[in-house]
Image: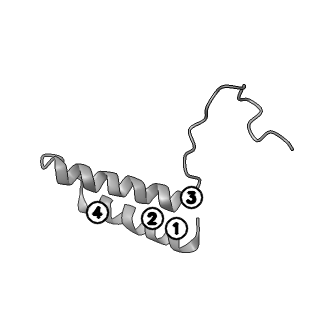
Amino acid sequence: MKDRHPHLTKGTHMINVTKNLGMLLLAIYLILVGIMALASGIVIPPVVMGILALAAGVLILIGR
């Protein structure tokens, strides 16, 4: 079996970031919504949040 990450030596760890772009965008969206809810002084334009939500939803639906 071929090593998937030959550049890593034994004992090193690689952070596993999701390869699903839709889920990554959803995670970013949820983090931003949480930050806005907890810190009322931080405002992110609704257009940005809407675009992020739409992109995440579409990519999750098409399986990307």
From mark 1 to mark 2, how far is it between C-alphas? 5 Å
Residue 56: image tag: 2
- From this viewpoint, which residue is outermost toward the bottom? 61
Q: Nearer the viewer, mark 1 or mark 4?
A: 1
The mark that comes first in sequence, 1 or 4, is 4
In the rendered view, tell whether residue 35 sits above or below residue 15. below
Do the numbered discs 1 and 2 sit on residues whose CB atoms are within 8 Å?
yes
Residue name at image x 44 percent, y 70 percent: 57
Residue 47: image tag: 4
Do the numbered discs 3 and 4 sit on residues whose CB atoms are within 8 Å?
no
From mark 1 to mark 4, how far is it between C-alphas? 18 Å
For the residue carrying disc 3, how many other residues have a C-alpha within 10 Å: few (<14), some (14-19), or many (20+)?
few
For the residue carrying disc 2, how many other residues have a C-alpha within 10 Å: few (<14), some (14-19), or many (20+)?
many
Residue 59: image tag: 1
From mark 2 to mark 3, how far is it between C-alphas? 10 Å
Q: Is residue 43 visible?
A: no
Residue name at image x 12 percent, y 46 percent: 41
Do the numbered discs 3 and 1 sit on residues whose CB atoms are within 8 Å?
yes
Q: Nearer the viewer, mark 3 or mark 4?
A: 3
As shown in the figure, which amino acid type bears the numbered disc 3?
Asn
From mark 3 to mark 4, how far is it between C-alphas? 23 Å
Q: Nearer the viewer, mark 2 or mark 3?
A: 3
Secondary structure of the residue carrying numbered label 4: helix
As shown in the figure, which amino acid type bears the numbered disc 4?
Val
Secondary structure of the residue carrying numbered label 2: helix
The residue labelled by disc 3 is: 20
Q: Is residue 48 visible?
A: yes
